[in-house]
Amino acid sequence: MAKKVVASLQSAGKDFAKVIRMVKSEKSGAYAFKEDIIPNNQVKDFIAKK
């Protein structure tokens, strides 16, 4: 039964992308990474945000 669940998650996962963006902290000036899993059609908007 677990094999069916894994197979259904893999096919549904093609509509989403994991996006990682580097963000500079205003307080300390250090860089941090922001990760999100978003739909493929919103990837460009996520990267363009500051």
Image (tube, helix red, strand yellow):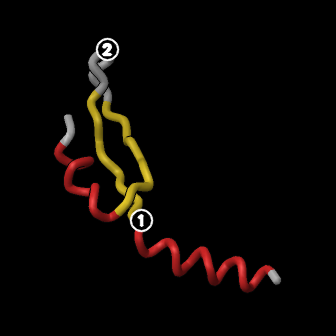
Q: Residue 2 at x, y = what percent?
A: 79, 80
For the point 32% across and 17% down, the residue is 28
Q: Which of pointers 2 and 1 indicates the residue nearer the eye?
A: 1
Residue 36 located left or right of residue 26: right
Q: Residue 34 at x, y = what percent?
A: 38, 42
Residue 37 located left or right of residue 41: right
Say what amino acid the circle numbered 1 marks.
Answer: Phe
Q: Which quadrant of the figure contains the C terminus?
A: top left
Q: Which quadrant of the figure contains the N terminus?
A: bottom right
- CB contact under 8 Å: marks 2 and 1: no
From the viewer's perspective, is residue 40 above or below residue 49? below
Image disc number at residue 27: 2
Circle 2 residues within 10 Å: few <14, some 14–19, many ≥20: few
Residue that label 1 marks:
16
For the point 37% across and 41% down, the residue is 33
Outermost residue, right direction? 1
What is the count of numbered marks?
Answer: 2
